[in-house]
Amino acid sequence: MTSTDSKKNEIGNFLQGEGDHVDSSNKERKLFHIFKYNENQYQEIQTEFIDDVINLRDSQSITWINVDGIGQENILTKIGSIFGIHHLVLEDILDTTQRPKVEDYENYLYIVVKMIYRKNQSDEIISEQVSLILGDKFVISFQEEKKGDVFEEIRNRIRLGRGRLRKAGADYLVYALLDAIVDNYFLMVEQIGDQLEELEDELVDHPSSKILPRIHFLKRNMIFFRTSIWPMREVIGSLERREFPFIEKSTVVYLRDIYDHITQLIDTIETDRELISSMIDIYLSSINNRLNEVMKVLTMIATIFMPLSFIAGIYGMNFRFMPELYWKWGYAITLFTMGGIALIMLFFFKKKKWL
């Protein structure tokens, strides 16, 4: 690769002080998105070439290498050889059905978490496995595809030098990545909570058969969140207890904050699951109440027409000697009697508050 090509791939060179904000949302995502930084300066590179990663290996600054897309096994093999990553770890990175976990190797930590976000502000939820390698002054994050992520705020903090990120070590960067993932969990769960409140109001006011599929959709989402977040607490708990040498004491308090957030998330999810179960009961009760109202109206109509049908049935019999048939006002009297009976019964129902 020529020096000219390398220059084209550089988004920000080593800068003194704060870097300019670069919005990468409008740029095509490259295979490698690399940050090399310290307290005073940073370098940002987006590239498709593994050679740029090799050139940054011996840097004394903190290096964050984000790999978008893990479909190229030969690229992973090269990264593994550069950073001394065990082949079993590379196999786990390729297997995107891994449960969130943390494993300690001699020269690095291997962390697996689930990143969840909505696709283009729609109701479709994207779940993506994120694998993190924490070593001495470097962090490697592997994402499944070039769909996007929740790390843009962290990139901006590195560019602008905000907070402790540029002043701290690689373990703090891992904390920031995990915190961004958990914060997005909060956003997703809050959105579902808002949907549940709206659905509950609609369920009470206007229950319909269209609501039940929406309830089951939210229920599946909550189950999915629960299965993703519960193992995450075990991962953060292990990191918080400093069971691994790459976690500095100063970072533990921040990891404890993530642990508290996950505990709060789990409580919220359990509450929402109970609410969803109660909503199903409310839906069934509402349907039964509507059915009871319909049956009540039909019963009252049938009750009103019972004596009227009785009278009509008597005078509908084909007997020859029925003196009322020859009365001049017999028809009018019969109609008046039937109307009076109906009015009396309506008044009785109203008095009993059945109407």
Image (cartoon, rainbow, N blue to C red):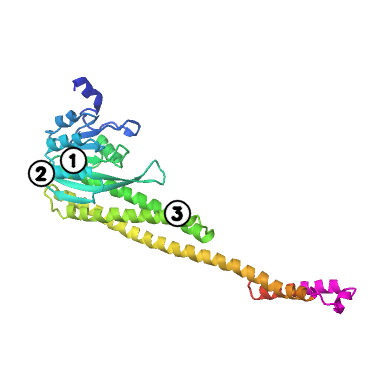
Residue 115 at least partly seen: yes
Left or right: residue 28 versus residue 319 is left
Of residues 86 and 343, the one drawn nearer to the viewer in this rendering = 86
The residue labelled by disc 3 is: 214
Of residues 255 and 278, the one drawn nearer to the viewer in this rendering = 278
Q: How far, Cα to Cα, is label 3 from label 1?
A: 40 Å
- Residue 185 versus residue 326 in the image, above or below: above
Residue 213's x, y, as percent? 45, 55
Image quadrant of residue 147?
Answer: top left
Count of marks overlaid on the render:
3
Left or right: residue 277 versus residue 132 is right
Q: Earlier in the sequence, mark 3 or mark 1?
A: 1
Quadrant in which the N terminus appears: top left
Residue 136's x, y, as percent? 12, 41
Left or right: residue 61 versus residue 129 is left
> Could you say which disc has been placed on residue 107 in the image?
2
Magenta stretch in the rendered image? 315-339
